[in-house]
């Protein structure tokens, strides 16, 4: 089965749909409620880090932190809430696509090609994951990156499942919104492919800037690669799989290895 690329006529505005201006407003609202707001926060956070009297590499960027230390059941409730809340922009995108007369399948976010998506995703994760770790370690050694702590959760039975859930939530949110939905809306507004790739990549890099220059550059490169692969495959799903595998390896790997290997910075 041949899958239509995201730059196909499927991205042409159907009759009766909102005009380009309203689609632009819609896009700004979706981003303002999700990763666009995260980008603004990350820029402020990085400015805060730069103006402290402490080297970037000596500062910590925590992920998946405990919300109720010493109270694991309350903490679990918070973690599940964060995961569910993080998926709401995806639900909003799905609703807006249905209003348009389409659905998330037009972005290739479905289970029609499970094995192919899994294989492609695993291959992409293997290539990008290793190079991303090398870039992080190099940029931190150069003093351009904070020390990222992927897990601050207590060592309880639900830690690993929650870390995997958080990784999957990140993957679905970012790839549906920043890859599928953003590209679709920008092309419907008449943007050319180079401008689309640049915008998607800059947005992806922006909300990782709180980690430092390495987080910005690495995710911009990843964003450009993901755009090209999305254009080739016409599906978000294999890239969501790749992202989920990368984050799961980072989150769970850190939780299991921190303090046990010398090469992994722990802050």
Image (cartoon, rainbow, N blue to C red):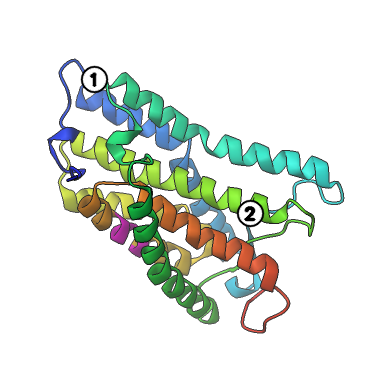
Does residue 191 lie above or below 260 as drawn?
Answer: above
Q: Which residues are magenta?
A: 221-226
- Pick the quarter of the image with the N terminus: top left
Mark 2 element type? helix
Task: Give percent across and percent down for residue 66.
Answer: 74, 51
How many C-alpha atoms fall within 10 Å of the one at disc 2: few (<14), some, or many (≥20)?
many
Query: In the visual, does 267 lie left or right of 108?
Result: right
Task: Give percent across and percent down for residue 115.
Answer: 37, 53
Residue 181 found in image quarter = top left
Residue 223 forms part of the magenta stretch: yes
Which is more toward the observer, 155 or 51? Answer: 155
Does residue 25 lie above or below 202 as drawn?
Answer: above
Which is more toward the observer, 77 or 66? Answer: 77
Q: Residue at x 72, y 40 (%)?
A: 78
Query: In the visual, does 63 lie left or right of 36?
Result: right
Q: Residue at x 39, y 31 (%)?
A: 93
Query: In the visual, does 3 lie left or right of 90?
Result: left
Query: Where does label 1 land, which residue?
Result: 18
Mark 1 element type? loop
CA distance for labels 1 and 2: 39 Å
Task: Give percent across and percent down for residue 152.
Answer: 71, 59
Q: Residue at x 73, y 76 (%)?
A: 259
Secondary structure mostly seen in magenta is helix
Query: Where does label 2 land, which residue?
Result: 163
């Amino acid at each position: 089965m041949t899958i239509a690329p995201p730059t196909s006529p499927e991205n042409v505005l159907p009759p009766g749909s909102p005009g380009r201006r309203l689609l632009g407003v819609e896009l700004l609202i979706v981003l303002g409620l999700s990763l666009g707001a995260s980008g603004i926060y990350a820029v402020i956070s990085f400015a805060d880090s730069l103006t402290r009297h402490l080297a970037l590499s000596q500062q910590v960027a925590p992920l998946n932190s405990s919300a109720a230390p010493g109270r694991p059941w309350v903490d679990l409730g918070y973690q599940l809430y964060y995961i569910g809340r993080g998926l709401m922009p995806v639900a909003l995108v799905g609703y807006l696509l249905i209003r348009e007369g389409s659905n998330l399948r037009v972005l290739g976010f479905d289970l029609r090609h499970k094995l192919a998506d899994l294989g492609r995703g695993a291959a992409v994760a293997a290539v990008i994951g290793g190079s991303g770790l090398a870039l992080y370690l190099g940029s931190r050694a150069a003093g351009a990156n904070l020390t990222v702590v992927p897990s601050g959760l207590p060592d309880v039975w639900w830690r690993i499942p929650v870390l995997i859930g958080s990784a999957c939530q990140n993957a679905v949110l970012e790839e549906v919104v920043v890859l599928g939905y953003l590209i679709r809306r920008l092309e419907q507004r008449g943007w050319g492919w180079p401008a689309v790739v640049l915008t998607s990549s800059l947005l992806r890099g922006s909300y990782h800037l709180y980690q430092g220059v390495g987080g910005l550059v690495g995710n911009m490169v990843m964003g450009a690669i993901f755009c090209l692969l999305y254009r080739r495959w016409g599906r978000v799903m294999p890239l969501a799989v790749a992202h989920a595998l990368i984050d799961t390896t980072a989150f769970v790997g850190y939780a299991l290895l921190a303090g046990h290997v010398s090469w992994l910075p722990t802050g």
